[in-house]
Structures are given as C-alpha cells and as structure tokens.
Image (spheres, rainbow, N blue to C red):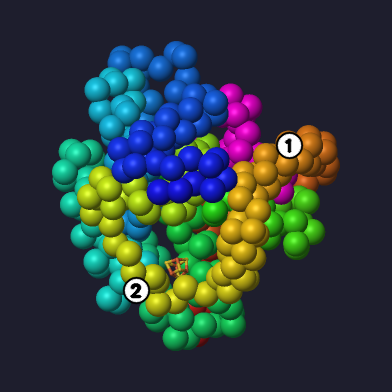
Amino acid sequence: MHAAYSGQHLCGSHLRASVDKRVRRRIRRDGLLPADASPADPETWVIGLSGGKDSVVLTHLLHDTFAEDPRVELVALSIHEGIEGYRDESLDATEALAADIGIRHEVVTYDDEFDVRMDDVVEDDPENMAACAYCGVFRRDILERYAADLGADLLLTGHNLDDEAQTALMNFFEGDVAQIAKHYDASLSPLADRSDAPFVPRAKPLRDVPEKEVALYARLADLPVHMATCPHSSEAYRGEIQQVLHGLEDAHPGTRHSIMAGYEELAELAAGRYKHDDAPGLSECVRCGSMTTREICRKCSLLESIEAA
Ligand code: SF4
C-alpha cells in the first residue's frame, strides 16, 4: 500500500505493524490505562462492537494488546436495531469474533429495550426525521446505560481518522462551536481531565488511522467483518463531507491529519471557553431517570411519538 500522506510504501505485515503502533501510541497519549490499574482492581473496557470493519479491528487489536494483561478486562457490546436482512448478519460477525478471542459478549436489542424496531420506526416516521436521528439517540442511550451497568471504566468505539475529520468539518461548516467543545470534552481530551464526567468516558483508539488502512488491516488479518451498508443509512450531509474530504486528500495528501491537528487545538480552546458558560445543568429524566438537560430526555420523547403514531 502507498500512504501518500507519509510517502511510505508498506507491505501487508508492515501495514499491520504500523496500525498496531499508532493505536498503542494513542492509548498511551490519551492515558487510557491509569497508572493505578492492577490485576486486583482491573479496568473494564466495554467495546461497542457492531460487526463492521472499524469495531472488529478495534476489538481484535485491543485483545492482541491486552489479552495477557490482567489489568484490563474487555467486554463486547453489540446492538440489534431491528433492521431486517442487515443486523442479523453483522451480529454473526460479532459472535464469531467474540467466541474466537474468548471475551464476554452482550447483545441488546431495541425491541427488548424500547419495544421498537427501526424498520417500523422508518415506516411510521412520526417526527419526519432521518432514520439515523432516531437510531442514534436509542444507540447512545443503550451504550451509556449498559456501559455503566457493566461497571465500565471506559467505553471504546471504532471511529477512524476519516470519521473524526468528517465530524470536525461538519462542526466547522455548521458553525457549531459549542458542539466542537462537546466533542473535545467527550472523547478528544486526555482521560485524566474527564474524571468528573457524569457518563462512562469514551475513547477512540483508531482515530489516527485512515479508514482505508483499517479496511486493509481487517482483510490482512482475515477478520470476520460484515461489509454491507445499513439500508436506512441517511446521513446525507456526512456523505457530502466525505466526498469533499476524499477529493482534498487526493489533491493534498495529509489533509485529514492537518485538519485534526488544528481542530484538536481549537477544540481545547473552545472547551475552555464554554466551561464557564451557564450551560443548562443535567438532571434526571422524569420518565427513565437518565441524565438530561430537559425534563423528559430525548429518547423518552421519541418513544412517546413512536407509540402515539
Ligand atoms: Fe441506525 Fe442510521 Fe446506523 Fe442504520 S445507518 S444502523 S439507521 S444509525
């Protein structure tokens, strides 16, 4: 593979070694494994495992790195949204991987949790919104709640460099400085700075690795990956940004890296600026008890509309 942004030509084994190195360096830089972690009091890391290439590579790599380290326990968490002909196959991939590496694997369904299936939500569409706008709220609720219930010290997701650069550009183009500050607080800042967060802290160890290299890694390591795209995928704006970014990266290799280098610096400044603002405080949702800035959280109000449809 030719990595134009670095000028390197890498064979399969060197590409794998290079990805391993970048992920381990990110784990160190973000301070994901605290110095006081011990075999007697191990860290529980819950991985959001969808069965797509990113989360499968992340799970494989974390297992490769920490399987012999008694200070870290890995748990995979997969979610079935109720999407016929799509999620069943990707859950097969997650089960194959978890069984192969021997880690605990939890599967949660929207049907059991909320009595909804995304196929039905899309058909009724009571709020006249894109499918992902419902689905993202439900998924975030399950990830946060289950990570806490499983006693997680960290919730890890497979976001890669392209995902992060797209999010950065979307926040810029929408002029959403508050969202940039939230992005920093949620997953870009060093873990030690997030000790007072009300949620299990998030981490994205693949965020230095371009998407294409994650896909190549999955193929080279012969990992069980589900490659299909969700039939309800509707993040049209992200798709447009992705095209822009591909064009810029082709014409100016290294664009994604430089976007993220500058963005992280600016995001830190924005987070400092917004820290002192009178943002609405968090309190418990009167329906489900989860933390929210409103009386009724977004998940409960969406479920209400779906039930009334
Ligand atoms: Fe849900 Fe959208 Fe992802 Fe499909 S693409 S699983 S609808 S968030």
Q: Which mark is residue 265?
A: 1
Residue 97 horizontal side relative to residue 24, left or right: left
Q: What residue is disc 2 on?
A: 83
Query: Is residue 299 placed above or below 199 in the rendered structure?
Result: below
User: What residue do we see at 46% from left, 53% from top?
Assistant: 211
Secondary structure beneath disc 2?
Answer: loop
Question: Helix, strand or loop at disc 1?
Answer: helix
User: Would you say residue 43 is visible in this rendering?
Assistant: yes
Disc number lying in front (2 or 1): 1
Q: Is residue 236 magenta?
A: no
Quarter residue 29 falls in: top right
The mark total stands at 2
State yes or no: residue 194 in magenta. yes
Amino acid type for the residue under numbered disc 2: Ile
Give the image location of residue 135, x and y in percent.
48, 67
Q: Which residues are magenta?
A: 180-200
Residue found at x 51% / y 62%: 136
Magenta residues, dominant SS class: helix
Vertical relation: 10 (above or below) 73: below
Q: Provide residue 120's location: percent of width, then percent of height.
A: 40, 81
Q: Nearer the viewer, residue 253 or 37?
A: 253
**Residue 161 or residue 87, whichever sits in front:** 161
For badge 1, the amino acid type reads Glu
Residue 25 percent coordinates (x, y) = 48, 28
Q: Are marks 2 and 1 in contact (CB under 8 Å)?
A: no
Q: Nearer the viewer, residue 53 or 212?
A: 212
In the shown orientation, is residue 268 left or right of residue 212? right
